[in-house]
Image (tube, rainbow, N blue to C red):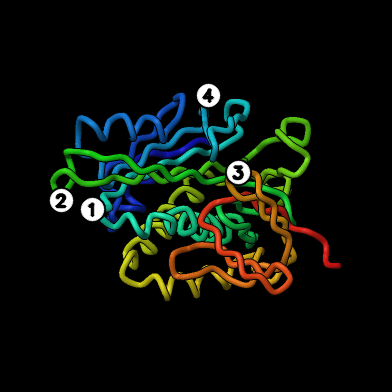
């Protein structure tokens, strides 16, 4: 299956996404929009491809997939001076991905903080949000966030980058309706962004419902390689994870989480 750009534009006509760009191939949809933000308005632009050749995850990690086996989508949003709430954007993208997959595929994923979408404990999507200053925003010289999501769609078992990954086709045994999946995700993301940043308490409650991390025993590796082991007890109003490490509360805005088996 391929992406139908015209149908996608029709499905998203009443959302914040007023420019839909479907390209055959590109290095990185995120990098494309971040670069353009320096020279043109990009708010409301979405760039999609099924062949991303130089995708990136957090910490500049490579995100690669054979041609046609992934769906990469990046969406640009003017954020003004709301930099204190930027940590929420990756979490909202995770919520939108879970909803989009549920609607299009019929499987409800879980979310591993901060940016992994899991089916049966295996990663099927990753998220990278980037912030850049731009002279071309509604707020003058303000900020633009580019929210990137990459979904493993049709990878076979031997194409997976790591054993802990999966694809939507492997997880369901069904064909992946790319246009329906993209439309459901982008509509959900638009709706969630309508509530950001004015309703972060409501968004936090919504995220807790879908989180597969909260309530689990986890290993949290913080920047600087400090390791914390404890129980994830929540996500605060800033989108930071809260971990109870044997009575010591640890709150982190960034880090890598591994789900551990119960003791």
Q: Position of residue 223 (x, y in %)?
A: 58, 46
Q: Is residue 34 above or below residue 79?
A: above
Please rate how many residues cluster around mark 1, counting C-alpha atoms within 10 Å: few if below 14, some from 14 to 19, many from 20.
Answer: some
Q: In this view, does 109 lie above or below 55?
A: below
Q: Mark 3 points at which residue?
A: 224
- For marks 1 and 3, give the CA distance: 30 Å
Q: Mark 1 points at which residue?
A: 80
Q: Which residue is drawn at 35% across and 60% down?
A: 193
Given contact means CB atoms under 8 Å apart, are the residues at marks 1 and 2 in contact? yes
At mark 2, the secondary structure is loop
Q: Which residue is drawn at 60% across and 45% down?
A: 176
Please rate how many residues cluster around mark 2, counting C-alpha atoms within 10 Å: few if below 14, some from 14 to 19, many from 20.
Answer: few
Q: Mark 2 points at which residue?
A: 139
Q: Which residue is drawn at 20% across and 30% down?
A: 39
**Does label 2 or label 4 sit earlier along the sequence?**
4
At mark 1, the secondary structure is strand
Give the foreground label among 2 and 4.
2
Please rate how many residues cluster around mark 4, counting C-alpha atoms within 10 Å: few if below 14, some from 14 to 19, many from 20.
Answer: some
**Does label 1 or label 3 sit earlier along the sequence?**
1
Given contact means CB atoms under 8 Å apart, are the residues at marks 2 and 4 in contact? no
Residue 7 appears in the picture as rendered: no
Please rate how many residues cluster around mark 3, counting C-alpha atoms within 10 Å: few if below 14, some from 14 to 19, many from 20.
Answer: few
- For marks 2 and 4, give the CA distance: 33 Å
**Does label 1 or label 2 sit earlier along the sequence?**
1
Give the foreground label among 1 and 4.
1
**Does label 4 or label 3 sit earlier along the sequence?**
4
Q: Which residue is drawn at 60% across and 65% down?
A: 250
Give the foreground label among 4 and 3.
3
């Amino acid at each position: 299956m391929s992406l139908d750009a015209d149908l996608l534009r029709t499905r998203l006509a009443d959302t914040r996404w007023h420019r839909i760009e479907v390209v055959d191939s590109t290095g990185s949809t995120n990098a494309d929009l971040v670069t353009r933000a320096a020279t043109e308005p990009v708010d409301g632009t979405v760039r999609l491809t099924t062949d991303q050749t130089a995708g990136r995850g957090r910490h500049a990690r490579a995100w690669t997939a054979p041609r046609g086996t992934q769906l990469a989508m990046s969406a640009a949003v003017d954020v003004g001076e709301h930099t204190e709430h930027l940590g929420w954007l990756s979490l909202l993208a995770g919520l939108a991905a879970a909803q989009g997959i549920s609607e299009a595929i019929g499987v409800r994923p879980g979310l591993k903080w901060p940016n992994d979408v899991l089916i049966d404990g295996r990663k099927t999507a990753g998220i990278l949000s980037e912030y850049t200053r731009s002279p071309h925003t509604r707020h003058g010289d303000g900020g633009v966030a580019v929210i990137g999501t990459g979904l493993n769609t049709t990878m076979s078992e031997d194409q997976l980058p790591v054993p802990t990954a999966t694809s939507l086709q492997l997880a369901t045994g069904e064909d992946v309706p790319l246009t329906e999946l993209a439309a459901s995700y982008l509509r959900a993301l638009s709706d969630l962004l309508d509530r950001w940043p004015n309703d972060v308490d409501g968004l936090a409650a919504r995220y807790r419902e879908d989180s597969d991390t909260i309530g689990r025993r986890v290993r949290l590796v913080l920047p600087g390689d400090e390791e914390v082991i404890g129980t994830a007890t929540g996500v605060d109003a800033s989108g930071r994870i809260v971990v109870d490490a044997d009575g010591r509360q640890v709150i982190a805005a960034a880090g890598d989480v591994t789900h551990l088996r119960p003791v």
